Amino acid sequence: EFDDWGRAGNACGHYDPRIGLSHPSAPPPAPAPGVVRGGALRRSRAAPGHRVGGVLDTTPLTSAVDQFADRLRAAPQSRLQRGAAAEALELARELSARAQRLEEPSGEVRVMPDAGMFAVADQVTVAAHDLALVLPGETALESAVARVAEARERAGI
């Protein structure tokens, strides 16, 4: 049998790292800090948009974009052709440009190419997650979340 970390153990799931074999009286290994059984990281209990350990919690942006992208992926082709894909591409380009300006203020902004209406959901997701990594503060976060909500409403999705 294997435990949650993929190591061999006995019927009780115990593993003795000292001898490398399962041992019925060995206690299960303690998980690393921040890890729960199964290996998933614990989620922050801080309010969205606040700093957690000095890092801005960008969950509101990533959640809003992920929902929008899921709706784009589920939308029929006719809806995408009526403007939803164009609106999403415009959003992806804007978020990408914001991220590039934050990373390199003096650099030239590269325009995200049009990869087609069926790829636009992935483009929005990538651009938003790139922006989430470089957002300087809560004001910029709120602005980005508002822009995603506006694009979703204008796309009619």
Image (cartoon, rainbow, N blue to C red):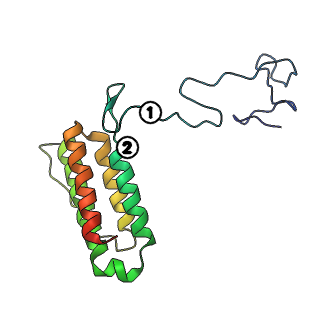
In the shown orientation, is residue 76 left or right of residue 32? left
Q: In the image, what residue occupies the spot 23% across and 65% down?
A: 90
> Looking at the image, can residue 90 be seen?
yes
Disc count in the image?
A: 2
Residue 82 location in percent, x, y? 29, 81
Q: CA distance from mark 1 to mark 2?
A: 10 Å
Residue 39 location in percent, x, y? 61, 36
Q: Answer yes or no: do the residues labelled 1 and 2 have beta carbons within 8 Å?
A: yes
Q: Nearer the viewer, residue 14 or 139?
A: 139
Helix, strand or loop for disc 2: helix
Amino acid type of the residue tagged 1 in the rendering: Ser
Q: Residue furthest left?
A: 106
Q: Nearer the viewer, residue 105 or 32?
A: 32
First reached walking from the N terminus: tag 1 or tag 2: 1
Residue 118 location in percent, x, y? 40, 73
Quarter holding the N terminus is top right
Instruction: Write down the residue under mark 1.
Output: 44
Helix, strand or loop for disc 1: loop
Image quadrant where residue 140 sits: top left
* Residue 59 disc label: 2
> Looking at the image, can residue 112 be seen?
no
Image quadrant where residue 110 sits: bottom left
Q: In the image, what residue occupies the spot 27% across and 58% down?
A: 149
100 lies above or below 73: above
Mark 2 is surrounded, within 10 Å at the Cα level, by few (under 14), some (14 to 19) or many (20 or more) other residues, namely some
